[in-house]
Image (cartoon, grey):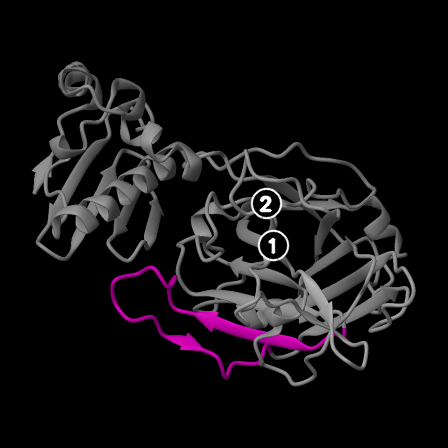
Amino acid sequence: MTLLRPAAAMAALFCSALTAMGQQSITERFARFLTEPHGYVAYRTAGKINIDGIMDEPSWKNAPETELFMDISGEGFPTPQYATRAKMLWDDDFLYVSAVMEEPNVWANLTQRDTVIYYDPDFEIFIDPTGDAHNYYELEFNAANVIFDLCLEMPYRAPRRNFVQFQWDCPGLKSAVKVNGTLNNNKDTDKGWDIEVAIPRKTIAQEFDNVLQAGKYLRVGFSRVEWQTELDKSGRTFRKKDAAGKYLPEDNWTWPSTGMIAMHMPERWGYVYLSDVKAGKGSEKFAYPTYRPVEKLLWAMFYAQEEQMRQNGRYFDTVEDFHLTAEELALLPQGAHLKVEAITSKYLITVDSKNLKMTIDEDGQILRTEK
């Protein structure tokens, strides 16, 4: 265990140590995973939303679009072949999501709920209601509106076994798909497919907490899976196989990118701010939560701990082991203390300041207390 003295007093020491070692800082080393996640302002609905796959209500028309989806691995990777954008709204009872997807051949073969829907082209929604990177929800839909929904205790990367509730069906979930063309007909050219979803507040609330409140942030990720295809003897579309009979890898197009082919990185999902302004009645500029810099530093230290465990079979157990730079220490609030407590297979990193306490552990759970 090591208690860091005030950041200003230690900055010069760590910076000189880093220079002497001639190595990258942890924020440089893991820069691909530390880019700022996208932000989105979700406005309140200005009227009833009819879940029919047709987003013609004034609220939808006045809701902002997300950025175009990009390759899951981020910058430097191919631009998706087909465009995808999403929108969000909310009211006291539902979080609403819609997406418009370009696709010249809309197909879906799976018909049974809770099969692995991404074996078809699909649209996926990930929601972490409290932003702790644990206890989150995944909803998948194909173009036939067949659903795969589950909730997870933690990401699959965690060193201890994850508890995944595959049998969980989201109570009260509403969804509808509109195919702009014809489903499962490769003889014509489609425009694509649209999806509209209403996710009940009660199904994603935790510990009786109302997660849909103005001023709160949700962490939300979207993913679209696309496959190379081939036709069977009957002319039906399927995933394409190589000469050895193995399925070719899928494309993963996401909002935002995670930095690697892994969607189960809740810390990389977008920040969705719930505005009390009704859609079309005004606007708010997105701003990251005030704790974002501390969160960024803790995730950089988490990635460094994962690398250290892979390479050396144990975790860092002192703050000095991280060789934090002056710029990295500047992410801490003034007067904050940084502490590392570790044994061979477990650790806890704590930032404690006048107004904020945040921790992260080896499972990647980040907890926040605002004082």
Q: Which residues are magenta?
A: 144-170
Quadrant of image for the C terminus: top left
Camera sees residue 56: yes
The reply to whether discs 2 and 1 touch (Cβ–Cβ < 8 Å) is yes
Observer-nearest residue: 362 or 6? 362
Is residue 233 one of those drawn in magenta? Answer: no
Res 251 label = 1
The x and y percentages for residue 165 are: 45, 78
The x and y percentages for residue 37 are: 52, 39
Q: Residue at x 20, y 35 (%)?
A: 338
Q: What type is the residue that disc 2 sits on? A: Asp
Q: What type is the residue that disc 1 sits on? A: Asp
Q: Residues within 10 Å of mark 1 (few under 14, many from 20)?
A: some
SS under mark 1: strand
What separation in Å lies between label 2 and label 1 (alpha carbons)? Answer: 8 Å
Res 71 label = 2
Residue 335 appears left or right of 356: left
Is residue 157 one of those drawn in magenta? Answer: yes
SS under mark 2: strand
Q: Is residue 169 above or below residue 100?
A: below
The x and y percentages for residue 254 are: 60, 50
Q: Residue at x 46, y 67 (%)?
A: 206
Q: Residue at x 31, y 54 (%)?
A: 364
> Which quadrant would residue 298 be assigned to in this image?
top left
Camera sees residue 50: no
